[in-house]
Image: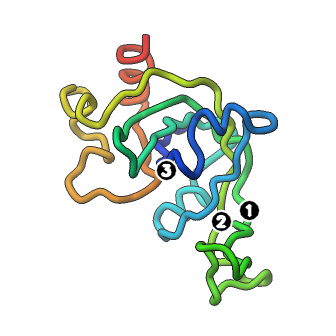
């Protein structure tokens, strides 16, 4: 089992939206970074743990716990000319962008980025690295345990 931190802008999909969705599952659309796409396409497996992170908002931070609920499949927004995620270079025969479905498990107290920075056990966490802008990053088993067992206990 692997663990991930997945960023979502709450005005697009919040943890509350995910919990209210059918089967508490949302398609993780709109990822347009090759490394993040490769994580979904090549590394994520059904059942992997997800820290659901609210980004680009007044108080960014971990807002919930989720799990990967599907294998990767083509992101349909790349084919929709009306979508802000449209990619004219993508085709049905040769999709460029993939997604996974994410199933929300629970909303947690918000753990702000500033709080994450105060814990030595999380010092190497990718989200805390200077200049990190990836929307999906791996989380080590030790970081997952610390967050779920210490900060969310």
**Residue 40 occupies quadrant:** bottom right
Seen at 56% across and 41% down, the residue is 14
Q: Secondary structure under badge 1? A: strand
Position of residue 111 measured from the top left corner of the image (x, y, whole percent): 36, 28
Q: Secondary structure under badge 2? A: strand
Question: Left or right of 106: which side holds 54?
Answer: left
Seen at 70% across and 52% down, the residue is 27
> Quick one: label 2 or label 3, which is nearer the N terminus?
3
Question: Left or right of 128: which side holds 57?
Answer: right
- In the displayed structure, 48 sits above or below 42; it is above
Q: Are marks 1 and 2 in contact (CB under 8 Å)?
A: yes
**Front disc: 2 or 3:** 3
Q: Which residue has dot 2 on it?
A: 98
> Quick one: label 1 or label 2, which is nearer the N terminus?
1
In which quadrant will I find the N terminus?
top right
Residue lying furthest bottom: 89
Position of residue 145 measured from the top left corner of the image (x, y, whole percent): 42, 22
* Disc 3: CA contacts within 10 A as few (<14), some (14-19) or many (>=20): some
User: Is residue 1 among what the camera can see?
Assistant: no
Q: Which residue has dot 1 on it?
A: 73
Q: Which residue has dot 3 on it?
A: 9
**Marks 1 and 3, how far apart in space?**
21 Å
């Amino acid at each position: 089992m692997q663990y991930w931190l997945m960023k979502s802008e709450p005005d697009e999909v919040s943890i509350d939206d995910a919990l209210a969705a059918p089967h508490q599952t949302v398609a993780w659309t709109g990822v347009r970074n090759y490394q993040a796409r490769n994580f979904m396409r090549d590394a994520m497996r059904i059942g992997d743990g997800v820290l659901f992170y609210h980004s680009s908002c007044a108080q960014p931070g971990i807002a919930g716990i989720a799990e990967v609920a599907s294998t990767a499949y083509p992101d349909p927004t790349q084919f929709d000319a009306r979508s802000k995620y449209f990619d004219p270079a993508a085709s049905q025969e040769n999709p460029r962008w993939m997604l996974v479905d994410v199933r929300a498990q629970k909303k947690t107290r918000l753990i702000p980025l500033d709080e994450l920075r105060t814990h030595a056990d999380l010092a190497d966490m990718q989200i805390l690295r200077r200049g990190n802008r990836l929307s999906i990053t791996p989380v080590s088993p030790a970081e997952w345990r610390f967050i779920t067992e210490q900060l969310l206990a």
